[in-house]
Image: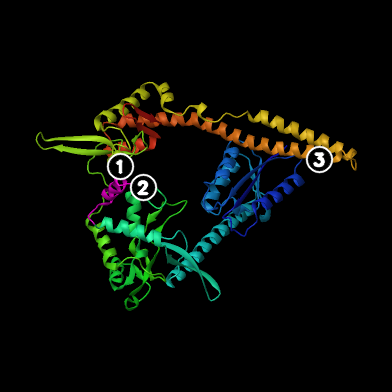
Amino acid sequence: MKRIGIYGRKSVFSDKSESIEHQFTLGKEYAYANYDNPEIIYYKDEGESGSYLERPDFQILLNDVINDNLDIVICYKLDRISRDVADFGAVYKLFMAHNTEIIPLRDNIVINENMSPIEKAMMYINTVFSQVERENTIIRVTDNMIELAKDGYWTGGRAPLGFSSKEIIVGGKKHHILSHNPTEIEFYTMVADTFLNGFTLSGLETYFRKNNVKTLRNAYLSSTQIWTILKSPFAAPADEATYDYFSSLGCKMVHDRSKYDGSHGLLVYGRTSGGRKRKHVTNPPDKWLVSIGLHTPIITSDKWLSIQKCFGNNTFCKTRKYKVGILNDILRCSCGSYMKVKHKYDKQYNVHYYHYRCLQRERRGSEYCASQMISVETLDNEVIEILKGIKLDKTLIDNYTTPASFFPLFRKPETINREIENEGKKIQNLTMSLAEASGSSAAKYIIKDIESHDKRIDELKEELKKSRLAMQNVKELQINKEDKYNAVCKIVDCIETATYDEINALLKETLTECVYDGEVLHIKL
């Protein structure tokens, strides 16, 4: 009996490609036409791109391949597996290492170890074309968005604070422009005016929290959110002052300066980039495309430029001033907030003091977190002593790792498979009875029983998939313990010679949890 996984994927819900249900139907028909009594498991990723492998059900499928639980994987086309050549190459090697065939139904190829050089070439050619198609699609969409931005249209995504996206018809085509949202404009104006009273970003965050000022979604504003609101250029008018500002930054200006008369707002395209596989970042100004929008601004250029000047004069530097606190950016308070190193200098005695202090308590006050600050030296020494103890006694690592009992308990795959076989036999017997009872009143009851057993098989297969994943997690946990022990030894061995940054980086890689509850330091490897 062949163990077959049928994988279905669709990029987005509006995608015009074959539905996942149809992909499953074709895969099931192929499996039953070519194999006797195949054991089929379905894997489904809706709304997931082929440009990355970190898809929920595809990861489960990979785990089943690694555990040698699948003989064959059927998919509609090879691009359902991946649209990236490098990613597909890694998947191909993994499947071949575990003797798992790939059958892309529409590509007329069976991928296994016995492929000829020409067949392998065709396999990679298909993947290359899939990647090229994906990249060309991205280029077409990007070019189209740039042209829309040049014409003043909103190119999509969530509208900035103070605006809503409004649909209009131009030349028989649907477009979107920014339209005023009065409620949000009032909130935006309040944030801008308050900031110009002399606050820093962190100071304004603290002020808003103490005065219970919340967003329109009833949440407190963070300094990052405040920065995003006030740096947004869409609220500003497209006049000569803002033209000069963005031009001086080196931005690409779509229109001549003479057209910046202040009657419309600004559109700036390409300020950020990133995605599922890349970190979301702010692009340098020379990548920005500045255009005149079709919307009306909500703030004067004088006020908006004054805000930008404040950012220039009061730049928030995230670089640490003091190379102390090896748990910096690792240690958390029991309230969930990070604990940051705070420095105090006693001029009278010429002494420097360093403490870990809860960031939430500092910003919001003691009513939100009762945690007290703790000496940096105390906690740093404690974590070092814990790691030294683990190196001396390897069994201590069990006190600082996730126990196997953490994972949900499932029945063994062998037990579930036996039940699936029994359900299959029941269906076979009922099918024979149905043939004998054809045309009688008993037929409808037999059909109902068959459907019930078929539904039970689907439930068992889902349980089987989860059981195999749980077993894989437990297996990986045992392997990871050895890796974690080696990492602990590495830190202990170089604790006296490595730099602060090196120790901090090693701890970030090794510790998955580091929490101080006010009395005890809790760590997990």
Identity of the residue drawn at 57% across and 59% down: 129
Residue type marked 2 = Tyr
| Residue at mark 1 | 364
| Residue at mark 3 | 447
**Residue 220 disc label:** 2
Q: Is residue 48 above or below residue 159?
A: above
- Residue 176 is left or right of residue 184, and the answer is right
Q: Is residue 211 magenta?
A: yes
Find the distance from the CA under tag 1 to the CA under tag 2: 10 Å
What element does badge 2 sit on? loop
Question: Contact (CB < 8 A) between labels 1 and 2?
Answer: yes
| Quarter residue 228 falls in | bottom left
Span of residues in magenta? 197-212
Residue type marked 3 = Ile
Observer-side mark, 3 or 2, equals: 2
- Residue 398 is left or right of residue 370, and the answer is right
The earlier-in-sequence mark between 3 and 2 is: 2
Question: Contact (CB < 8 A) between labels 3 and 1?
Answer: no
The one nearer the camera, 336 or 139, is 336
The earlier-in-sequence mark between 1 and 2 is: 2
Quadrant in which the C terminus appears? top left
The earlier-in-sequence mark between 3 and 1 is: 1
